Amino acid sequence: MLSESTAHLVENTAVLGEPEMVHIKGADDPMPTRRLLAVGEHRPRLRGESSLVGRTWELNTATAILEEAVGGAGCVVTMVGPAGIGKSRLVRETAAIAAARGVAVFTTYCESHARDIPFHVVARLGRASMGIEYLDAGAARAHLRTQVPDADADDLLLFDDLLGIADPAVALPDIAPAARRRRLTALIDAATLARTEPGVYVIEDAHWIDEVSESMLADFLTVVPQAPSLVLITYRPEYLGALTRVSGAQTIALRPLSGAQASALTTELLGSAPSTIGLAELVASRAAGNPFFVEELVRDLAERGVLHGRPGAYLLPGDVTDVEVPATLQASLGARIDRLDPTAKRTLGAAAVIGSRFDADLLTSMVDDADVGALIEAELVEQVRFTARAEYAFRHPLIRTVAYESQLKSDRAQLHRRLAAAIEQRDPAAADENAALIGGHLEAAGDLHAAFAWHMRAGTWSTNRDIAAAHTSWRRAREVADRLPDDDPNRVSMRIAPRTLLCATAWRVGGSGADTGFDELRELCTAAGDQRSLAIGMSGLVTEHFLRAHRRESSRRAPEHVELLESIGDPTLTVALLPMAMVAKYDIGEMAEVLRLAQRIIDLADRDPTVGDLIIGSPLTFAIAMRGTARWCLGIAGWKDDLHQAITMARRVDPLTRAGVMWCMYITAIAYGVLLPDATALRDTADTLAAAEQSGDNFALDLARTARGVTLVHQHGPHREAGFELLAKIRERALNQRFALIALPIVDIHIAREKARLGDLDGAIALARTVVDDMLSAGGCIWSALATTVLVEALVQRAGEADLGEAEAVIERLAAAPADEGLVLREIWLLRLRALLARAHGDAAAYTDLRDRYRDMAKSLGFDGHIAWAEAMP
């Protein structure tokens, strides 16, 4: 006969090995046994738990989808409803059906106090699904490598780090955060798709999920339909996050029980004795269709002695009119907690501070005489892990909420303080990894200075792992600093520090310029005289506006940024941050200012490519490329030498700088007919793209994709198609705010030109007209001349009744737009366009004159593309 603990263990088993025949003492014949491989988290039916009433359709639906998933048609099922409506119970029943069929079940859960702790949920699910949840770090790493034997060695180190099992003696690969996310997602997806055995993945209470886990799980869910997997997600109606918008997901919305269903449940719990009939009606009415409330009301009445007997066979000695029933579910739970003896109540309070789940060791470190048994007996908590290190869980999140909030604030603060110390002392090597959790507990304890330090530490730890996670920690630090009293001597500097980091890196996580909080940072920095922090924050603001195609705003901020850097007088800081102002001026075509700023960087860097490597690895290399671009735009000699030097240096620097140089070298210069898309361009863009894919961040990768795409679409044959595939991907990412909006006109111009080449002149003109209007209405930008050219070429080719008139008007509009004196970038295109228009009008003399002047100008400037185009003109 199995012991109660062993029975629970077997009932919770998710994965068992193949049966083996083993000789057992006292048995004549060998007995079949199985080796325990993993223990699932789906819970057995609790003592006193009622039948699943009113959920037949929902359970049948979930079971039918499970059958399809087992057959290979993976699916995501979301279960939504208010607290107590039965989401977890429905998941538990579905998981039990899966386990009975031998399907592995892997569970993770989200907690209200952990919603700002990055990777919290995805790491838990990863440990469960890989079968390493109850292994020490060394054993977990070894087991993990058996699960994904073909994975890249660096990717495995990143996976170790994500799952919290990294070897502290082994350095992590030097990989940018976005690339880290991309490679981890690819590894997880590959492992999921390689899985041949069906599995059920449970994510409970997604309304409390941390932002990073939400994003990573949303990516993971896209491959579920291709695997024999069922994903069950529960959340409350107020949650509107990414997991509610999974393509192809089936949603089961749980409604309150009907009157008949609530009465049936109440009768089952109370019994059918005549004395309880009126009480059953009262309970069902008060619970308003919430099954958990029904159960709690009956427990409350039994504990108070209002009911006599046992569950399902109660008697009501008195009159139902004398019975007091709690008005709310929270009140019912609060009354039950108040009836605990002092030791059990202290234990419950400490457990509530720890979280929805807690282990005995951590609980003992907070309460000397912890009594979990009394809590299990009262059906407030349950044991969910039956090993040497026992683990317990609250039966319902609302129980934990009421237990937490019913404590005195001073008692609760002391528990949070003890818990923070216990977490740090329990695993000192994981202090950085646990920094966000420790900071949260110290914040709840009111230790604001310590909490701030831990949140900032968490941000530092996350910076090279996931920039969005770092932002979460910096926002927490900002909130803590704002709570400090006005007379705190460190308040101003503490308020500045996280805001500086948030502003400086806002462009790396998306959003609008308003999200940076820059105006508040400037006010604080001005009051404190902290110009350095202001300059760093302003660099992020300028970059954010530039990437979001807020061209005029970015350009307006740039001179202010330059002036601030010059007033600080730090050459290294100036070299590091001046490129942001330079690209803002480049985008609107102010090439004289680009030339001045580029030369300033070059002079201050004094031939050292590593000076000022705060944001990009080599500001000097990028500045030389930008100087070359400004020089050819203005017709100044020396631009070829600059571009040659920049590309030579770029081959030895970081992927972000290298991709930025490719943007100047090949996107602008090839599109504008300065350089030809030759074999060197093909090799450089391919090598840069490969480097970005291997170790760069997403921004560098998308820069490299754009450069490669533009180079390819200027080729012939299959290269062109591959180029447009890359540009289509860039366009989609830009529209989804995953890459810079400045890429949109570049892509659309090339799409419009391709439409014209294929004969879709109407489509080409409509698209090019939109781009030209957007640009010239906003004052113009670097791409205005090229967009105008594509539109005019298509209009001249269509040559309808009004087309030539529109072409002439567009040409004159470009000519009248503000521009630097001597901007040959525009002048040479105006010559070409006027020549094309003259030929379309049949004016041979004007055409010949304009063509010859165009050809001579192209040769004098050394613009290889224009030379080829001019020679091709009849």
Image: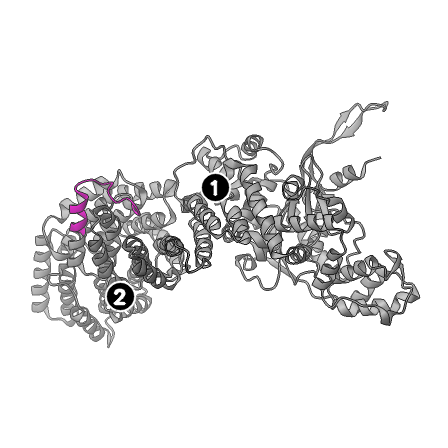
Q: Is residue 846 magenta?
A: no
Q: Which residues are magenta?
A: 598-616
Front-most of 414 and 846? 414
Residue type at mark 1 is Asp
Q: Which mark is residue 262?
A: none
The answer to whether residue 115 is visible is no
Front-most of 755 and 531? 531
Q: Which residue is mark 1?
A: 432
Residue type at mark 2 is Arg
Instruction: Give the class, few, some or many, for how many residues have Cα within 10 Å of label 1's Cα (few <14, many ≥20).
Output: some
* Left or right of residue 92, residue 570 in this image: left
Instruction: Report the Cα–Cα distance between label 1 and label 2.
Output: 41 Å
Q: Earlier in the sequence, mark 1 or mark 2?
A: 1
Residue pictured at 16% horizontal, 53% vertical: 868
Residue pictured at 36% horizontal, 43% vertical: 696
Q: Percent from the top left, x then y, of residue 22?
A: 77, 24
**Considering the image in quadrants, where does the N terminus appear?**
top right
Q: Secondary structure at mark 2?
A: helix
